[in-house]
Image (spheres, helix red, strand yellow):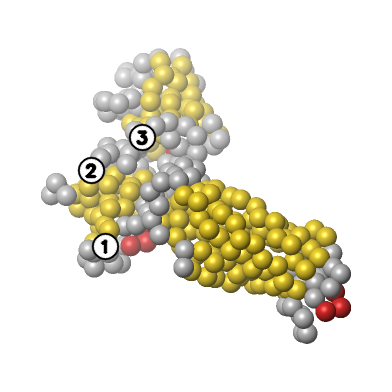
Amino acid sequence: MTTIPRRTKLILSNVAFTGDSLGPEYEFTFTAAGQAATVKVNMKQRREAIVNRDIFDLPELLEAHRLPLRIDVVEKDEVFDDVGSLDAELAISYPEPREQSITFEITVKGQGREIRKKSLAHVTVVACLDKGIRYVAGLDPNSWLSVRFDAGFEEEIPHLLAVELVEITAQAIRFRILEGRYKGELAQISNSPRRDYLRQEVGVRREAAQMVLRSGVQRLQIGGVGEFSVMVDPRNPIPRGTYRVEIPDEPHDKGAPYLDRAKYARTWFRIGDQGDRYIHTGEVTAGCATVNAVESWDEICKVLLRSRLDSQAVGTLEVLP
């Protein structure tokens, strides 16, 4: 059994040079926590380069930390290498923010015929805190992940639901569910071949979805997506008011007939924190807000599944006459 470490990844984000031009071929060597890594950067015909290369992982951090870091810069020449170095500290706060960047300035001195030249290297390093947070993904064409709970039952959880890794064995990946219907529950999936179903994605979340349903004209407006025709049941209308719209609770088999037109047809969003009114797609309604443009449903879901009001809801729905 392997407990998931909370690691910090160092990334060389970008480099820029001011001062004299010394040449195009550079090597940046980083040394910290008993590790060393070298990144090569070609600066030909430019003074700044976006690199975004991993340097190395640091051991578990449980508190704010000041990391001694040495950076050596070498501009490779046929005869004399131009060199510079810096001994510094990388201050890392914990547990937030997840991404922390700092720019170091290193003087690179010319050698040989360039002895009178010097350049200032601006080296930006990003520390990314990996707290074991992962998101359900890679589920084509199903969009729901079947998991076994520690409590002994099996259920499915939706695309982009957040979980926290707990431990890995040769047989299983175990995690705690952080939001939605099963928030706080421990569950697991097979270690192989479904390991890629829990992914670390930066920027996976967006702000809470703002939706307006105008029942009289049967139109649903979703901020950031557009306006769609919906069906509402005049004999069982949704009362006027503002409701929370929940994270999908379970796959709804009534959406199965539309799977050939929408991958997320079984993904429904409950209106309010109780009852059986949902925002979903299809051609029949019974007290719900039913988007009858089935081919548009995947576009809607891709936004709503990323949206969060809190750990139980994707946003709000205002119902107007």
Question: Along the horizontal axis of the image, is 234 left or right of 104?
Answer: left
Q: Nearer the viewer, mark 1 or mark 2?
A: 1
Alpha-carbon span between mark 1 and mark 3: 28 Å
Q: Earlier in the sequence, mark 3 or mark 2?
A: 2
Which image quarter is the N terminus in? Answer: bottom left
Between 47 and 294, the one lying in front of the other is 47
- What residue is drawn where x is 80% and y is 58%? 18
Q: Which residue is mark 1?
A: 2
- What residue is drawn where x is 30% and y is 67%? 193
Specify the farthest residue to the left.
152
In the rendered image, residue 118, in percent from the top left (x then y), is placed at 81, 65
| Image: 280 above or below 22 | above
Which image quarter is the C terminus in? Answer: top left
Between 37 and 200, the one lying in front of the other is 37
Badge 1 marks a residue whose secondary structure is strand
**Badge number at residue 227:** none
Badge 3 marks a residue whose secondary structure is loop
Q: Which residue is mark 2?
A: 185
Question: Along the horizontal axis of the image, is 167 left or right of 124?
Answer: left
Q: Which residue is mark 3?
A: 311
